[in-house]
Amino acid sequence: MSNVLRALRASWGILAILLCWQVWVGLSGVNSIVLPSPAAMLRSLAADPWLYAANAAQTVLLALVGMVLGVALGTGLAILTWLSRFLAGLLTPLGIVFASVPVVALIPVLARIFGYDVRTVLVIVVIICFFPAFVFTTTGLRALPAGSEDLFRVLGAPTRRRLWLLALPAAVPDWSVALRLAAANSILAAMVAEFLMGTSGLGYLFAAARSDFDMEKALGASAIATLVSVVAFLTASRFEKRVRDSWR
């Protein structure tokens, strides 16, 4: 009971907005094609829960796998730039330029390379999650305690030991920030790619429902994606807080 009350206190603002939304739609008589009510969205969710569940499962799976691969790629390249000044000068500008290209512009090119299916969606998620992992890990690897690197050099520690015992532990708090950013962005990236690719998943469900003027279903797909993104963000934020508390 206490958990329910705590959740209500934390989300009272959202509940108030939904209530005002429901009342306004009912009083104004606006067409459901323009703006369906929250109650209509819930009825759509209850009418065919397996449709939403199947598409949500695909989107979440692609987002999870893409986030893991993107964060791993960004972390690995950040470590390489720490180990080599040559690679730092080569990879850092390329990573910034590549991440600056709008994802919408990349989708047609990547679709021609990987195909018009879930592989392209996965690649898009990897690209979106790569950049924060690369930037924050690179920053963390160089944010060493004052004098610590000189001490390791005086003691004759080899580069690998300095990486394992000094640089990587120092980078963990910044790496957790990248994970928090990637957790929510991965869902958005997967949904946008599915929307533009027109294959399957929540993004495709939204696009198909919108083209059929079934705005209750489109709103339901958006609500599920939003809920999953919020849960992913909060979970990653809790992990980040624990990391920062333990690294103090």
Image: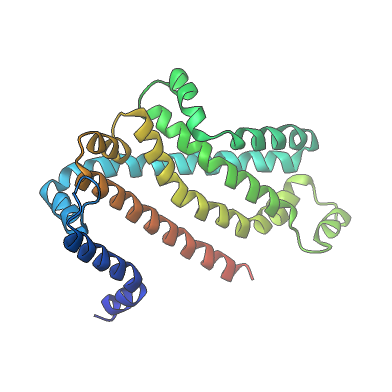
Relative image position of residue 225 (x, y in whole percent): 33, 49
Relative image position of residue 182 (x, y in whole percent): 50, 49
Relative image position of residue 210 (x, y in whole percent): 25, 38
Q: Quadrant of the N terminus?
A: bottom left
Q: Looking at the image, which residue sits at the far left?
A: 47
Q: Quadrant of the C terminus?
A: bottom right
Coloration of the structure image: rainbow
Q: Looking at the image, which residue sits at the far bottom?
A: 2
Total marks placed: 0
Q: Residue at x 61, y 60 (%)?
A: 173
Figure check: 132 above or below 115: below
Left or right: residue 5 compared with residue 41: right
Residue 171, quarter of picture = bottom right
Q: Looking at the image, which residue sits at the far right?
A: 154
Q: Looking at the image, which residue sits at the far front?
A: 28
Relative image position of residue 88 (x, y in whole percent): 75, 37
Residue 3, quarter of picture = bottom left
Foreground residue, 29 or 169? 29
Figure check: 239 above or below 111: below
Figure check: 97 above or below 148: above
Foreground residue, 16 or 226? 16
Q: Residue at x 49, y 39 (%)?
A: 69
Left or right: residue 148 compared with residue 45: right
Q: Residue at x 47, y 32 (%)?
A: 123
Residue 73, quarter of picture = top right
